[in-house]
Image (cartoon, rainbow, N blue to C red):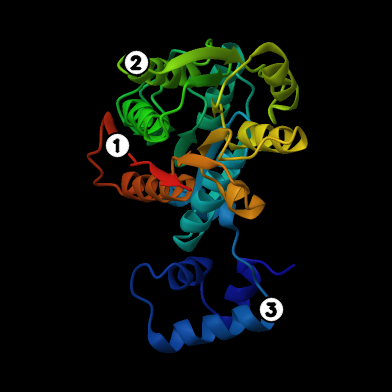
Amino acid sequence: MSSIEDVAKLVGVSTTTVSRALNNKSYVSKKTKQKIEEAVKELNYVPNKVAKSLSSKRTNIVGVIIPSIIDPIYSEEINTIEKVLKEKGVRILLCLCPRNSHQYELELKNMLNSYIDGIISAVYDFPVTMAEENVPFVQLGGGKVDYSRKVNVITDDYEVGQAAIKLIEKGKHKKVIVQHGPLSLSEEQDRLDAIVYALNGSEVNYELQLVDQDDPYGIEGTQNLFKDFKDFDVVLSRNDQNGYQVVLEAQRRGIMVPSELKVIGYGGSQFLANMNSPMTTISINPSKIGNKVAELTISMLAEDSKKKNQQISVPISIIN
């Protein structure tokens, strides 16, 4: 493999001149630069990106921490983030981190020690105080990370609750089953609080059903739904995957969706679009969230970034 010394020797200049020419730094004559470029091609020389990044103090790598790769919402958000950042010459270092406070804090520290330029995190259930590093931090969700250069990109749970009650009241439904995950997860608790607040302000009768965290597609939860609850005509599902299982089970039982049973999902990823399901969903617009997160990250990577402790909400939409 050729080295920068080989290029310098072939052209008859110093390695410093070669480095300056390749990095467009300082003055190098057009004639010399052309000879260097020709030598690079002839020798198939590839610059050492690690050394280059260390000298510039930039790696063009952003760390991304998510709790799960099988969740279609996270998958769509990360896919969009990676695509937008890649167009700007920035790569991602993906880390899967379980919802464990010690593990999360450890992963954050590992990220900061990995010469990354910024952090994007979708794990936010645990209060963590980060050292005042000069690293931009973009949080998907509310977040409890105490850090000055942080921006939160959120979904407004109050807006979700109001959208849910409008969909329910529109059909004059009698009884709603509200599915939710473990309330130890802050996003589950916050969303449920908003939905219950909206339901309590209406005349709609409702019951709550806990869907286990280890049942991501809602298969067991759906069986328990039809076994444990009676006379309901709306299911407000924890997510689109759970909602899809409810639709399948209802159809298996000869229940017409949506005329006899209205199923409302949550998420709005391509998962739903590809299934051609008869359920309605409250979409958090994961691609738009991914775009916003990527744009904010690029902006914060700029040396003149002044963004600190901001919270930005991405509007929801309804998919019928």
Residue under numbered circle 2 = 197
| C-alpha gap between disc 1 and disc 2 | 23 Å
Q: How busy is the neighbourhood of tag 2: few (under 14 within 10 Å), some, or many (20 plus)?
A: some
Q: Nearer the viewer, residue 155 or 60?
A: 155
Query: At 31% from the left edge and 37% from the top edge, which residue is drawn?
Result: 313
Residue 302: % across, % down: 31, 49
Q: Give the SS element for disc 3.
A: helix
Residue on which the image places disc 3: 43
Residue type at mark 3?
Leu
**Residue closest to the eye, 54 or 198:** 198
Q: Quarter of the image holding residue 39?
A: bottom right
Q: Which residue is mark 1?
A: 312
Which one is earlier in the sequence, the residue at label 1 or at label 3? 3
Q: Which numbered disc, 1 or 2, marks the residue that appears first in the sequence?
A: 2
Q: Badges 1 and 3: C-beta atoms under 8 Å apart?
A: no
Label 3 crowding class (10 Å Cα cut-off): few <14, some 14-19, many 20+? some
